[in-house]
Amino acid sequence: MFNSHTGAIGGGELWGYQIASILNKHYDLRLYSPPWDAKFNKYYDFQIPFLGRTAFISNPDLYVHYSTHVIEKTKGKKNVLITCFPKKEWPKELVETYDTIITLSRYSANYIKSMWDRKARIIHPAINITDYQVANKEDLIVSIARFFKETGGQSKNQLELIEAFKCLSSGELKLALAGAVLTPQDQDYFDLCKERAGGLNIEFYPNIERADLKKLLARAKYFWHANGYGRTDPYEVEHFGIVYLEAMASGCIPIGFETGGGKEFIPFTFKTLDQLQKLTLDLEEQSSNGLPLKMRHIASEYSMEKLEKELLRAIDN
């Protein structure tokens, strides 16, 4: 298995490792990824051997290419291409050499059909519901994402969330922004966010430990996510959003941007920051109506057992 999703600890990386962990159970797996994937292994407690990208086994029974960035020539007796979203620069004739294409949402599958005229198998990322708890809910909104801003990237728009929160800050609600700060450029963006949040009821949790992140989600009433806001390129939106599942498993009510794969399973979406504010305030005026438990039930349907069954079925067909 070739994996190009490296260097960060995010949903795309997690899905790749979930797939690798299943393949490791059923095959003699060789995972070709850079050494810095070890930090991801430690963060999520995966026990998967990985090798450098220097030498592939010749003509393996199964070659799995997992990437949203680069494509390689097929190398096995059976070849599976797994991608979060199709890259328009990839040659169609090279894509056609793969026996099976797998993606993670109907949103991405529709683009694969229109771009390459191929029907992709949809296999959703998963979570272990027992890893998450629902605590007594506080007047807390949480957003979890790496702090960064780059052209052509998937910045999660924390600055925009801060602007949206300004209109809510006179009430009891608090906003918590948690996420990785990995590079000097990330640090610049993080510092700008802190500057813009001055005087507001906003807390920051850079490079938060996973155990503390789960505790934060367990206490939070709402989950805000703005990936895709202000963009028109479908490559730059949230193609699934496993972080939604983590929040919902913790009983958070998710409110996410309307474009992308997340809208296939989250109940509340927004198009403008005004809508985000209004949705949050409207939910505040209602009783919970059992929403935390309803969110947890939805998240429980995205299990590793289901992912494993569907992945093996897609490979065997």
Image (cartoon, grey):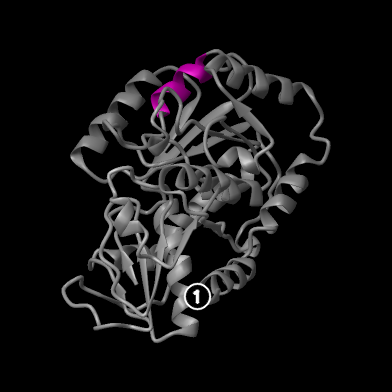
Q: Assign the magenta stretch its main secondary structure.
A: helix
The stretch drawn in magenta includes residue 118: no
The quarter in which the C terminus is drawn is bottom right
Residue 249 position, x and y percent, is 65, 52
Of 249 and 106, which appears nearest the observer?
106
Which residue is more in the foreground, 193 or 262? 262
* Residue at x 44% of width, y 59% of height: 14
The residue located at (41%, 29%) in the rendering is 158
Label 1 belongs to which residue?
22
Can the viewer see residue 271? yes
Above or below 80: residue 26: below
- Residue 5 appears in the rendering: no
Which secondary structure, mark 1?
helix
Near-viewer residue (49 or 130): 49
Magenta part of the protein: which range?
Answer: 158-166
Where residue 172 sits, quadrant-wise, is top right
Compared to residue 167, the image places residue 4 above or below, namely: below
Give the amino acid type for the residue marked by disc 1 in the picture. Answer: Ile
